[in-house]
Image (cartoon, rainbow, N blue to C red):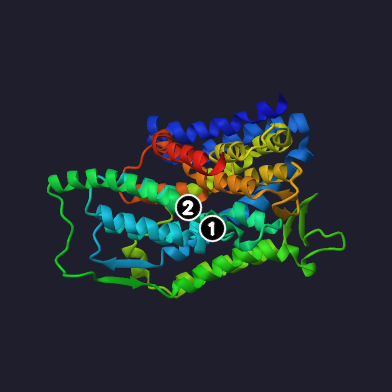
Amino acid sequence: MNSLLLCIPFAGLLLCIAVMPLVKPEWWEKHQALAVIVWSLLFIIPSIVLNGAGETTETVLECIVNDYLTFIVLLFGLFCVSGNITLEGNLAGSPAVNALFLAFGTLLSSCIGTTGASMLLVRPMIKMNSWRKNKAQIMIFFIFMISNMGGCLTPIGDPPLLMGFMRGVPFFWSLHLFPILIFNMILLLIIFYLIDKKQYRKDIANGLRPDISKPGVDIKVEGLHNIVFLVAIVVAVILSGTLPSLPMFQDAAGNVLGITIYKSVKLTFPAMIEIAIILLAALLSFKTTNEKIRTQNHFTWGAIQEVAILFIGIFITMQPALALLKTMGPNLGITEPYQMFWATGFLSSFLDNTPTYLVFLTTAGTLGFTSGIVTTVGTISVKILTAISCGAVFMGANTYIGNAPNFMVKSISDENGIRMPSFFGYMGWSLCILVPVFFIDMLVFFL
């Protein structure tokens, strides 16, 4: 009961994120930090009463040091570097061009991560469609595909798969998900093309026309040297997943070495290396790039600031929900692939998909499979592992908070004058489009 009561601040903060921009937009824009502080305290103070100051401090510091810090530094680094790359040209956003761009970005996500691909491509996508009025659907499908589904093919693509790799899942195993990704890409691109074509015709009927005065396709990319810094950030993420397993980063008991912050809370040396590389890449990106490029990109700090404020509250207040999930996970009676797919996916829509993935991966490891993928948590059947991986990666697209880049893409779109749907409005899109696709996935791949 106590654990359920401590989940109320998390639900309250989510409700604020969903409702306040609709009922009090100006107040919300100015006082987001206040709301985060209030809801965080509404978790921290009762937790101190119920669990003691020491345990509560340890819980809060653990999530800030080991989860939030690396999360926001990665997002900050990618935001900075991608903001220093601009695409100029006469490529106009038509339904066909947009669909091709979404397909390219979806496949790129597995190479540089969903966050990296999202930050790199969000501004070019917005620029291509700057002449259009009806374009929110473009960015919604951008979140569906580039910010989420595209990350399923490698551990680089999405953090849950990186955690699986750290626990013995082979690096290239995720390529088994390629047929499922292509299947979903085809379905979503067809749906997108039909919706975007309808909105495109409305824009044309209203007299809007792209600037196609120059013949042929003329595309110019500036700040291309920043790809080096983008690669450095990807390398930093890979190192964060591989260095902890090396003997030089472990003590005699096999624990990862680092600086102790409080009790068992430790900032590990691999995490420090990751943070240092990312921040250095961001600094060098700014030092070596002409400010004119950021001006062309309409670069501001608003989007990263909003994400930093809201997500520290989300990370803190979600801890009771995650603890409850870890306790109940093995006792939920979830043993079939389709059950793993929906359970992992549903919870990944609202909680951090990485710990959700780990809970069900660990649960699957206790089911007693004698053949399949051998991991440090046990042998897991290929079909079960496929279901858990797809649920965690794909269904992060169901809400704005399901995956880190979702909210960032929304914020950048809002900044650039695109009227994105509200929290519940976006969920309406995912319920009408993604959930039927996931139901088809279940019938085809997980029964």
Dot 1 alpha-carbon crowd within 10 angstroms: few under 14, some 14 to 19, many 20 or more: many
* Residue at mark 1: 153
- Are the residues tagged 2 and 1 within 8 Å (C-beta)? yes
Dot 2 alpha-carbon crowd within 10 angstroms: few under 14, some 14 to 19, many 20 or more: many
Which amino acid type is shown beneath numbered disc 2? Answer: Leu
Identify the element where label 2 is drawn: helix
Q: Position of residue 369 (x, y in %)?
A: 74, 46
Q: Is residue 341 above or below residue 1?
A: below
Quadrant of the frame with the N terminus: top right
Identify the element where label 1 is drawn: loop
The residue lying at 47 percent from left, 52 percent from top is 181
Is residue 182 in view? Answer: yes
Q: Position of residue 173 (x, y in %)?
A: 61, 59
Answer with the quarter of the image where residue 240 lies: bottom right
Left or right of 160 in this view: 332 = right
Give the CA separation, mark 2 to mark 1: 8 Å
User: Which sits in the foreground, 78 or 342?
Assistant: 342
* Residue at mark 2: 181
The residue lying at 61 percent from left, 43 percent from top is 315
Left or right of 406 in this view: 257 = right
Which amino acid type is shown beneath numbered disc 1? Answer: Leu
